Amino acid sequence: MWIFGFVLIQIIVFGAVLYFYKKITAGETENTVQRLGAVYEDLIKKQKDLSEKLEAAEQEYQAKKEEAAQIADKLANQAMDETRKKEEVILKKARAEAEDILAKAHASKDQLSKELEVEANRKVVDFSAEILKQIHDEQLKILLHKHFIKSFLERAKKSDLASVELHGQKPVLRTPILLEKEDKDQLQRVLSEQLKIPGLQIDEVADETLVAGVALQVGTLVLDGSFANAIREAADAYKEEV
């Protein structure tokens, strides 16, 4: 009889323990679900905030990109204006000096003809150096350099190089400022198409006497798109007018 009573007590105790255990675990499960819900809502909120920040950052980037492009255009225009003004001043000075030289030459044309040619060539070099000294802003020099490179690339596209023979040599590019990779790659593509030589490479050589722009030697052909050459051509044109 006492065994039966003991068993009954054990059953009651076990049932009470099981009841309280289920109640406790049920409460913890509910709390866990609530916590997970709160974490999920917080995650959604943070994701929304992040998306808004990314969108704002993209808008700011585009605005700054547009602003940078406008500033670059403005600087380029300023560089060209300044260069034209300085070129006009130097050319006026050159004309005055040339007129003085010619006045002396008329007195003894035969004697001074050779000296005149030497003096004119020296002045061309001096003009280029003078313009370089006048432009103190490195950024303006680079913009001027890029302007001449752009003009040279357009000229190269229109040049007929089909009859040019390289004889196993690479084209040689002289420039006062080394080309950016994009410009150099574009020039190599143009020459490859013109010469019908896939994957053509060019040798780049520094030459500060060009002032700005480039001069390209392809075989025996020389394409000169430099600032110094532009000054020489202007001086030659003036001599023909005189």
Image: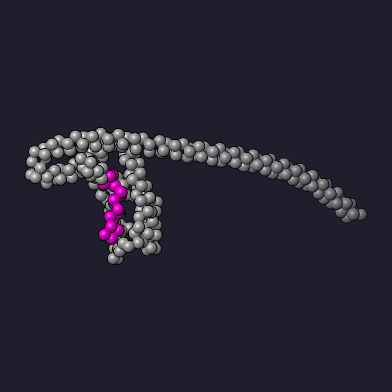
Q: Which residue is drawn at 56% across and 37% down?
A: 56
- Residue 100 x/y as whole percent: 15, 35
Q: Residue at x 34, y 59 (%)?
A: 161
Residue 26 visible in the snapshot:
yes
- Residue 110 x/y as whole percent: 9, 45
> Residue 121 magenta-drawn?
no
Which residue occupies the extreme right position in the image? 1
> Residue 226 magenta-drawn?
yes
Q: In this view, does 47 lie above or below 8?
A: above
In the depicted view, which residue is nearer to us: 52 or 33?
A: 52
Q: In which quarter of the image is the C terminus?
A: top left
Residue 133 visible in the snapshot:
no
Q: Locate residue 104: give its quadrant.
A: top left
Apparent side of residue 167 relative to residue 114 in the rendered image (left or right)? right
Residues drawn in magenta? 214-232
In the depicted view, which residue is nearer to us: 212 or 124?
A: 124
- Residue 231 x/y as whole percent: 25, 43
In the depicted view, which residue is nearer to us: 191 or 142?
A: 191
In the depicted view, which residue is nearer to us: 38 or 66?
A: 66
Colour option used = one colour
Q: Residue at x 35, y 53 (%)?
A: 156
